[in-house]
Amino acid sequence: MRVTVCDGKIHRARLTRTDLNYEGSILIDADLVKAAGFSERQMVRINNVSRKCIPWDTYIVLGKPGSGEIVLNGPPAHHFKKGDIVIILAYGSLKKKKVKRHRLKVVFVNKKNEITKVEKK
């Protein structure tokens, strides 16, 4: 049996832009993607801390390393806005017996989406 787990997260990042007229996805600074252990095209869930709205599932597109960019594209631009604080969660699948040993990576960032700390929890 396999279990879906939270594999990692980028905690309290700020959206630098939204673009309604894009086909969809979230562009994330490649340095943040690497630090969190995420992969390009991996599915992630975006939770908005700043406003009451539904979480949004989409896939990652790599942004320029060191840019601090986090751009949410497509339909969620109706609900998420530039400057919103978000938590980006990535999911993985593990065999049930490995779940207790699993530690997720948490990437903490400052107001410019610069990495301040990375922890395994």
Image (tube, grey):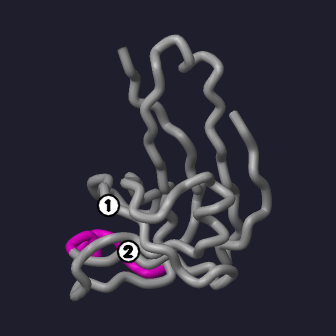
Q: Quadrant of the N terminus?
A: top left
The residue carrying mark 1 is 58
Q: Which residue is mark 2?
A: 72
Left or right: residue 116 versus residue 96 is right
Res. 6 mark: none
Whether tag 2 and tag 1 are in contact, CB under 8 A, the answer is yes
Secondary structure of residue under mark 1: strand
Near-viewer residue (8 or 87): 8
Q: Secondary structure at mark 2?
A: strand
- Structural crowding at the residue carrying mark 1, measured as other residues with C-alpha within 10 Å and reported as few (<14), some (14–19) or many (≥20): some
Residue 68 position in % (x across, y down): 62, 79
Say above or below: 93 vs 108.
above
Q: Is residue 63 above or below residue 92?
A: below
Q: Residue at image x 72%, y 72%?
A: 114
Q: Residue 58 location, x and y as percent?
A: 32, 61
- Give the quarter of the image for residue 30: bottom right
Residue 112 falls left or right of residue 81: right
- 115 left or right of 67? right
Q: How far apart are labels 2 and 1 at the CA level?
A: 9 Å
Residue 26, position in %: x, y?
Answer: 40, 71
Sequence order check, earlier mark of 2 and 1: 1
Indicate whether 74 appears above or below 49.
below
Q: Residue furthest right?
A: 116
User: Range of the magenta residues?
Assistant: 75-82
Mark 2 nearby-residue class (10 Å; few <14, some 14–19, many ≥20): many
